[in-house]
Amino acid sequence: MTTINQSLFCTNTVTKNTSNVVIQLVQNNTRPSLIVTIRDKNTGLPIAINNSTVTMRFKQVDANTVKDIISGALLTGYENDDGTINNNTPYNVPGAGGRAILSWNPTTLDTPGNFQGEFEVNFSDSTLQSVYDLQNFIVRSQL
């Protein structure tokens, strides 16, 4: 029997929420970057992801293939409930507060439509865990 001790979820600075909110974007833009916090779904506390890799697989809804894989950069700090960032020890180390920033590649948002993102953490011990809930996105056509 396999026991999963942690179930991950992800919050972001755009919506302060997970997959139940659609992030709205515009075709051909490369901003805003997504700042996410990887958290334990049971406690809500951030998971230390120091020396880990965070990626997001981005695909159009109902597509069979992933459009892009976006790599994140680890950030220092712990996000307090009021949205302020605590950079005191131990959160002065990138990833210690579960935070990462993901920036759009130039061709990721070149197609309008409905998309989903799957966040994934490749931990420093080479184990891999995905956030179960998908983040929804809509990309509208650029005028």
Image (spheres, grey):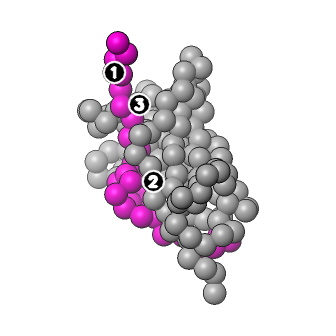
Q: Residue at x 60, y 65 (%)?
A: 31
* Magenta segment: 1-29
Q: Is 114 drawn above or below residue 131 in the view shown?
A: below
Rounded to the nearest angstrom, the CA distance separating label 3 from label 2 is: 19 Å
> Considering the numbered disc 1 on the image, is that residue within a helix, a strand or a loop?
loop
Q: Is 44 drawn above or below residue 117 in the view shown?
A: above
- Left or right, 21 with reference to 128: left
Confirm or deny contact between disc 3 and disc 1 (CB under 8 A): no
Residue 55 position, x and y percent, is 59, 41
Q: Which residue is mark 3?
A: 47
Q: Is 3 drawn above or below residue 57 in the view shown?
A: above
- Choose mark 3 or mark 1, whichever is in front: 1
- Left or right, 64 with reference to 7: right
Asked if residue 20 can be seen in this view, the reply is yes
Label annotation for residue 5: 1
Rounded to the nearest angstrom, the CA distance separating label 3 from label 1 is: 12 Å
Q: Residue at x 63, y 81 (%)?
A: 142
Asked if residue 74 can be seen in this view, the reply is no
Q: Which residue is mark 2?
A: 135
| Mark positioned earlier in the residue sequence (3 or 1) | 1
Would you say residue 9 sits in the magenta stretch? yes
Residue 15 position, x and y percent, is 38, 60
> Considering the numbered disc 2 on the image, is that residue within a helix, a strand or a loop?
strand
Would you say residue 25 sits in the magenta stretch? yes
Q: Residue type at mark 1?
A: Asn
Q: Based on the displayed image, in which of its 4 quarters is residue 22 positioned?
A: bottom left
Q: Residue type at mark 2?
A: Gln
Q: Residue at x 66, y 54 (%)?
A: 67
Label annotation for residue 86: none
